[in-house]
Amino acid sequence: MKKLFSILLVTLLVSLFLVTTAFASHGDPVGSCPPNFELHHFMDHSGDHMHRHIGVDRDLNSDGYLCVKMLPNDLHLHVDNFLPLP
């Protein structure tokens, strides 16, 4: 019984950590995108993908957002959101 309680306690603590991490929200963007680009949350793109990314691979203004434009041949053009907000 003590072993079962320990397992349930560890499972509960791990699940609380994962839920808190999953629902962490981004702040507001500090800039906007050029025409024909969409604002997206920045994420690590170091793994294998079905499409290729070109442009910046870092969030240059550290606000957690990037501008993305879909191009032909499964290319995604990334630029930082650098335009002043209205």
Image: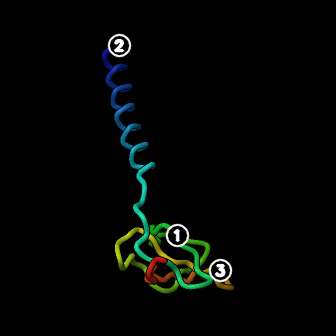
Q: Residue furthest right?
A: 72
> What distance separates the C-alpha of mark 1 from that of mark 2?
48 Å
Within 10 Å of disc 3 (Cα), the crowding (few <14, some 14-19, many 20+) is few
**Which residue is painted at 39% across and 49% down in the image?**
21
Q: Quadrant of the N terminus?
A: top left
- Give how far apart the Cα atoms at labels 3 and 1 are: 17 Å
Residue, disc 1? 40
Secondary structure beneath label 3:
loop
Query: Which residue is at a point 49% across and 77% down the rendered structure image?
Result: 86
- Number of residue marks: 3
Q: Residues within 10 Å of mark 2 (few under 14, many from 20)?
A: few
- Circle 3 is placed at which residue position? 74
Residue reaching furthest to the front? 86
Counting from the top left corner in percent of width and height, residue 34 is at: 54, 84
Q: Which residue is mark 2?
A: 1
Q: CA distance from mark 3 to mark 2?
A: 55 Å
Q: Earlier in the sequence, mark 3 or mark 1?
A: 1
Q: How is the image coloured?
A: rainbow
Q: Label 3 sits on what residue type?
A: Asp
Q: Nearer the viewer, mark 3 or mark 1?
A: 1
Query: Does 17 sit above or below residue 66?
Result: above
Frontmost residue, 54 versus 24:
24
Instruction: Give, as a three-letter code, the residue at label 2.
Output: Met
Q: Secondary structure at mark 1?
A: strand
User: Residue at the location (43% across, 79% down)?
Assistant: 57
Snapshot quadrant of residue 64:
bottom left
Q: Position of residue 20 (x, y in %)?
A: 39, 44
* Vertical position of residue 56 compared to residue 12: above or below: below
